[in-house]
Image: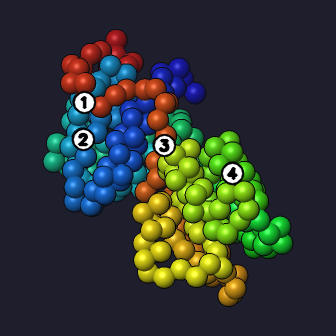
Amino acid sequence: MSEHQKQIGRNEHDARASNELVSVQGERAALSGDSELAVLCECGDASCHKPLVMTVDQYEEIRAEPAQFAVLVGHEMPTAEDVVATRDGYLIVRKHGDAGVIANAGDPRNHLKTCRVVLVDDIPEIRFLLKMLLAAEPSCEVVGEASNGAEAIEVVDRTRPELVVLDLEMPVMDGWHALPHLRRVAPTSHIVVFSSAAIDGRLEKRLTNLGASRFVRKGGDPAIVIQAIREVAQAGRDRTFATAGEGGRTAGTGADVGRREGDD
């Protein structure tokens, strides 16, 4: 693999990581599919900070394949990619050869293929049952357990899971008090409340306001909670993106395009 291809891949990864952050900010703002996002040109030039405007749905169309990128007209690189579609103001390109390998390996959403789960319940037998049931789910991996809310905060802060299964009635700190702390230490984690507590519509709304994604009542078919975990986990993979702090280019700088990587 040439150093030229490697550098192009690194540059494009930086642009994609920045665009994923723009997208998750859009999700937090509850943007709909036809809402517009301002993202970066995902070309292989590290000095390119030119903006692109597209809808959330258009962005997701491109992200359907890790080897697809959005670039400005004239920023395509025939040695590393093919133009597969022309859109208003930009092109969709698909990497080939070594560049395609780099694009797939460096996709910021790769870590979302497995949903990492923390189980929080004061009854060890329930945690064991859930752990055994989730062992049959190829898309889920239990990465931590806690027997009360205080332990849960420490475990979640340490493991940063995509999903937390939380009981409400526990010693030391119950789930009600733990919820806002869990939201603080892991704001992107989804929380499924799994409890035998009697919850009416008012209390379920309160749980939602505190940050819960779903409430499932204990005492029924265990497959119900597994289905809820599966659905919440899938929703998280569909619209959860790379986290901040990865460096790379920043959208909206408006810098001029300089020499393109690999040009003589």
The C terminus lies in quadrant: top left
**Residue 242 circle label:** 3
Instruction: Look at mark 4 in the image and give the residue it sits on.
Output: 150
Instruction: Look at mark 2 in the image and give the residue it sits on.
Output: 38
Question: How far is the residue under mark 3 from the one under mark 2?
Answer: 17 Å
Q: Is mark 4 on a helix, strand or loop?
A: helix
Q: Three-letter amino acid code at disc 3?
A: Ala
Question: How far is the residue under mark 3 from the one under mark 1?
Answer: 19 Å
If you read the primary sequence from the N terminus, does the residue marked by circle 4 or circle 3 appear first? 4
Q: How is the image coloured?
A: rainbow
Q: Three-letter amino acid code at disc 4?
A: Ala
The residue closer to the viewer here, 253 or 27, is 27
Can you give x and y, in whole percent of width and height, for residue 187 in the image?
50, 48
Q: Three-letter amino acid code at disc 2?
A: Ala
The residue closer to the viewer here, 50 or 37, is 37
Please report contact status of discs 3 and 1: CB closer than 8 Å, yes or no: no
Furthest-top residue in view? 264
If you read the primary sequence from the N terminus, does the residue marked by circle 3 or circle 1 appear first? 3
Say few, some or many: other residues with alpha carbon within 10 Å of mark 3 (under 14 / 14 to 19 / 20 or more): many
Q: Is mark 1 on a helix, strand or loop?
A: loop
If you read the primary sequence from the N terminus, does the residue marked by circle 1 or circle 2 appear first? 2
Q: What element carries label 2?
A: strand
Question: How far is the residue under mark 4 from the one under mark 2?
Answer: 40 Å
If you read the primary sequence from the N terminus, does the residue marked by circle 3 or circle 2 appear first? 2
Q: What element carries label 3?
A: loop
Question: How far is the residue under mark 4 from the one under mark 3?
Answer: 27 Å
Is residue 70 found left or right of 133 in the rendered image?
A: left
Instruction: Look at mark 1 in the image and give the residue it sits on.
Output: 252
